[in-house]
Image (tube, helix red, strand yellow):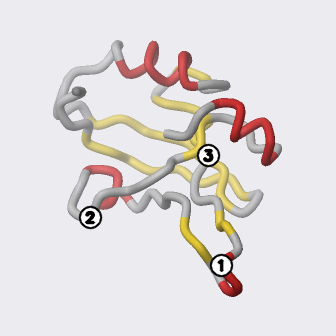
Amino acid sequence: MVADNIAVQFGVKGVIVHKVIPGSPADKAGLSGISSGLNNNILLGDGAIKLGKFVIDNSDDLLTARESFQPNDSVKIVTIRNEKIKEFQIQLAKFI
């Protein structure tokens, strides 16, 4: 995840997904992290706005919500990508 002030700077709701590791639960679910586009423009991936029943406004909200689940739980995550709402089902990994 990206620092909350970066999300505010870009005018993004929720918590920006910074990097998705290949083969990770986030990758398998279809989440997208920050990347670079043509002319090295920054392309924001997903902004997580809901995890299960928990609304995500900032990184504290995400961490609090994550504590409500166990590894291997299957949880719906709602994101904003390119100004569109997207829903993913993700199987949570061990939280480090």
Q: Secondary structure at mark 1?
A: helix
Above or below residue 80? Residue 44 is below
- Upstream in the sequence, badge 3 or badge 1? 1
* Residue 51 spot, x, y in % from top left: 48, 30
Q: In percent of the image, x 44 and y 19: which residue is there? A: 63
Q: What numbered label is drawn on residue 14?
A: none
Relative to 32, does residue 77 appear above or below in the rendering? above
The image quarter containing residue 22 is bottom left
Residue that label 3 marks: 47
Under tag 2, what secondary structure? loop
Residue type at the position of mark 3: Gly
> First in sequence: mark 2 or mark 3?
2
Could you give the CA–CA distance between mark 3 and mark 1, rounded to whole angstroms? 20 Å
Residue under the point 30% across and 58% down: 21
Q: CA distance from mark 2 to mark 3?
A: 19 Å
Q: Residue furthest front?
A: 40
Q: CA distance from mark 1 to mark 2?
A: 22 Å
Identify residue for label 1.
40
What is the count of numbered marks?
A: 3
Proximity of marks 1 and 2: CB atoms separated by less than 8 Å: no
Q: Which residue is mark 2?
A: 22
- Horizontal side of residue 13 vs 44, given as left or right: right
Q: Amino acid at mark 1?
A: Asn
Circle 3 crowding by C-alpha within 10 Å: few under 14, some 14–19, many from 20: many
Q: Nearer the viewer, mark 3 or mark 1?
A: 1
Q: Position of residue 83 (x, y in %)?
A: 77, 57
